[in-house]
Image: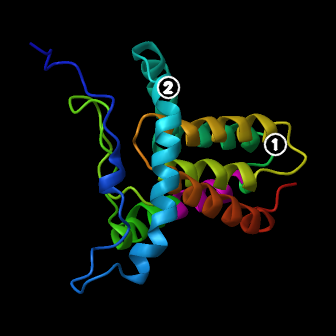
């Protein structure tokens, strides 16, 4: 008899990853055809990560991933910079708050993408739309808003990369969710860095 309490780590969320509804007429729609490369990428990365998903590794990655909840690690980062330039740090924190609200609110409401199949149905699972990744957005938004001369920039980029990867590793997001969130965050942060006006 199989142990029903053990989560099935072999399932892949490919069937839940369509970015559009199936058309009523015969044959795939343009959006469905356009989504196929994204679905293939998501499924391929998930299979590559699967052998690494061991209980101890999952616990460690999950603990690390949560440092990005509510932008906590990034608010701490900005508070460190705020000792030297408090006004600029406050502006950056305001941009972080506004951007996070927009991404996690209107943008996710528009996409309504299903999240990947959970590794463990009993474990924590984020709610809401999967696309784009809010953690990835906020991580790269703050990283790119940091002054180019700051010693925190490289460590911030390292932490941002790790948080972004962790969201896929834990199946909180599809790969394309975090890529979109990271790209949007990095582009927005680069544009806003001048408005932050670090001294």
Counting from the top left corner in percent of width and height, residue 34 is at 48, 74
Please give the name of the residue rendered at 56% of the width and 60% of the height, measured from the top-left corner: 180
Along the line of sight, the residue nearer the viewer: 62 or 116: 116
The kind of secondary structure the magenta stretch mainly shows is helix
12 sits left or right of 137 in the view: left
Residue 67 appears in the figure: no
Location of mark 2 (residue): 61
Along the line of sight, the residue nearer the viewer: 99 or 92: 99
Counting from the top left corner in percent of width and height, residue 144 is at 74, 54
Along the line of sight, the residue nearer the viewer: 118 or 160: 118
Please give the name of the residue rendered at 13% of the width and 16% of the height, measured from the top-left corner: 2
Residue 155 appears in the figure: yes
Any magenta on residue 92? yes
Gap between marks 2 and 1 measured at Cα:
33 Å
> If you read the primary sequence from the N terminus, does the residue marked by circle 2 or circle 1 appear first?
2
Please give the name of the residue rendered at 43% of the width and 47% of the height, measured from the top-left corner: 173
Q: Which quarter shows the N terminus? A: top left
Q: What range is drawn magenta here? A: 89-99
Q: Furthest residue to the right?
A: 149
Disc assigned to residue 84: 1
Counting from the top left corner in percent of width and height, residue 125 is at 30, 39
Relative to 119, residue 82 above or below: below
Category of crowding for the residue at label 2, using alpha-carbon neighbours closer than 10 angstroms: few (below 14), some (14–19), many (at least 20): some
């Amino acid at each position: 008899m199989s142990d029903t309490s053990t989560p099935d780590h072999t399932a892949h969320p490919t069937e839940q990853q369509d970015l559009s509804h199936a058309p009523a007429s015969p044959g795939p729609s343009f959006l469905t055809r356009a989504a196929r490369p994204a679905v293939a990428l998501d499924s391929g990365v998930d299979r590559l990560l699967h052998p690494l998903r061991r209980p101890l590794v999952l616990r460690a990655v999950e603990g690390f991933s949560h440092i990005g909840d509510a932008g906590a690690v990034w608010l701490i980062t900005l508070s460190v910079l705020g000792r030297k330039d408090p006004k600029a740090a406050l502006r950056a924190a305001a941009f972080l708050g506004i951007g996070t609200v927009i991404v996690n609110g209107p943008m996710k409401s528009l996409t309504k993408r299903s999240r990947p199949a959970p590794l463990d149905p009993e474990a924590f699972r984020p709610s809401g739309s999967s696309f784009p990744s809010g953690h990835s957005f906020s991580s790269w938004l703050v990283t790119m808003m940091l002054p180019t001369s700051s010693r925190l920039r490289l460590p911030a980029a390292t932490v941002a990369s790790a948080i972004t990867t962790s969201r896929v590793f834990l199946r909180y997001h599809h790969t394309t969710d975090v890529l979109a969130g990271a790209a949007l965050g990095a582009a927005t942060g680069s544009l806003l860095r001048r408005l932050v006006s670090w001294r």
